[in-house]
Structures are given as structure tokens and as C-alpha cells.
Amino acid sequence: RLVLEVLVWPLLEGDTVTLRCRGWQNMSVTQMQFYHENEEVSRSPNRTELSLSPLQLKNSGQYRCRGWLKTGESWQWQQSAPVNVTVHVPMANATITPDPLSHQVHTGDPVTLHCSVQVGSAPVTFTWLHNGQEVAQGPVLELGDPMWDIVQSPTVAAGVVGSLLFLALLMGIIVAFYWWHRRDARKHQKR
């Protein structure tokens, strides 16, 4: 029996990943073929690996390999079980937009903040924090009379500025995590 291994998880757009096909208990394999969604993508008499670089969303899907496997004294065509590969798009370009935009906002006026990301793999979750405490979840934060006890901001503008500063910090953390993960994934891939 053949085993198809994905050498790095999770898979991010732009990364490189290697799929390795090997015989169960390291039995000899030759004439390897790799399939993506039942379409042959690679054939080689001696190579047992398929490298995908740079990863794109279109690389997501089911992969399997097929080859001649030596079982005892004979050779047989064998194929691996399918492996699901999902390529994720890192979140980018988070934006907080205040509403209403069209008129001057005064202390005590209701304000709605909308958070969105330009790109990112689902599911994207949103958590709103104030002074390190969660105040809401979801892409919309409504600041009205009940929220002023929590926010305790002298002006709505200061609250919006504080939220934007928090967003900048959050984006820095997301970018740092992304690059740290890429570095860690590449380190494992080089082994």
C-alpha cells in the first residue's frame, strides 16, 4: 500500500509544499504518478515527491499517488488514499470604518465601527477589545448609550483613534505570527 504525506501544515498561499509518496513500511516504489482531483499532474520513474511552489488557492483539493510497489517478490500497481490539501490566504489589509461618516459626531452620539479584511481564508473572526477586555464579537461594533459606561471616552473621536491604534497593534501581531509561522514551516521543510 502507498502512503501520501504532506510535509508541512498549515499551507499558506505563496509557500512551498512537498507531497511525498512512499511504500508502506518503506517498501520499494517506482513509476510514481501524482494526481490532483483525479487529473495526473506528475509522472516520474524514480521521484517520489511532488513540489508545489508557490502555492495558490487553485492547488487546494484532493491529491493521491500511484505507483509500482514491490510486495514480496512481485510488483503491483497501488495507489494511496486521497489527501485533502487546503491552501489558506493570510489575512491582510484590515480596516476599521466609522459610521456615520457624513456628519460631525459629538460625545454621546451613537457610532458604529465596521472591521473588514481585504483578503483572508474563511472563517475570519473579529473580536473587539477595550483596555484588553473583550467588548464584542463580529465585524460590527455599535457604540451607543449603554456602551459609554464601558468605553468612558471623552470624545467619540478618541474612541475611534484608540480603536484604530488597537487595529494597528492587532495587524502587527497577525503579520508577526504569519512570518513566524512561515519561518517555522520552512525550517521543518528543510529537515
Image (cartoon, rainbow, N blue to C red):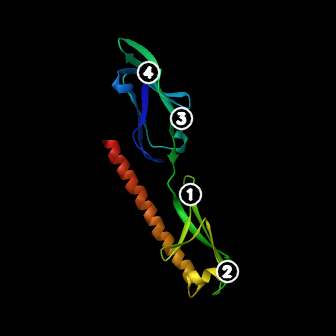
Between marks 1 and 4, how big is the CA–CA gap?
40 Å
Between marks 3 and 1, how big is the CA–CA gap?
24 Å
CB atoms of marks 3 and 1 within 8 Å: no
Instruction: Answer left or right for 81 relative to 184.
Output: right
Q: At label 4, which amino acid type do we have?
A: Gly
CB atoms of marks 1 and 4 within 8 Å: no
Residue at the image position 44 percent from the left and 41 percent from the top: 53
Between marks 4 and 2, how big is the CA–CA gap?
65 Å
Residue at the image position 34 percent from the left and 26 percent from the top: 26
Q: Residues within 10 Å of mark 4 (few under 14, many from 20)?
A: many
Between marks 2 and 1, how big is the CA–CA gap?
26 Å
Label 2: state its secondary structure: loop
Between marks 3 and 4, how big is the CA–CA gap?
17 Å
Could you tell which of marks 1 and 4 lies nearer the N-terminus? 4
* Residue bearing the label numbered 3: 62
Between marks 2 and 3, how big is the CA–CA gap?
49 Å
Could you tell which of marks 4 and 2 lies nearer the N-terminus? 4
Q: Is residue 147 above or below residue 12?
A: below
Q: Is residue 145 above or below residue 168?
A: below
In the picture as drawn, the residue positioned furthest to the top comes out as 73
Q: Residues within 10 Å of mark 1 (few under 14, many from 20)?
A: few
* Residue bearing the label numbered 1: 124
* Residue bearing the label numbered 4: 67
Instruction: Answer left or right for 85 relative to 104.
Output: left
Could you tell which of marks 3 and 4 lies nearer the N-terminus? 3
* Residue bearing the label numbered 2: 110
Q: Position of residue 18 (x, y in %)?
A: 40, 37
Q: Position of residue 45 (x, y in %)?
A: 39, 21
Q: Position of residue 182 (x, y in %)?
A: 39, 51
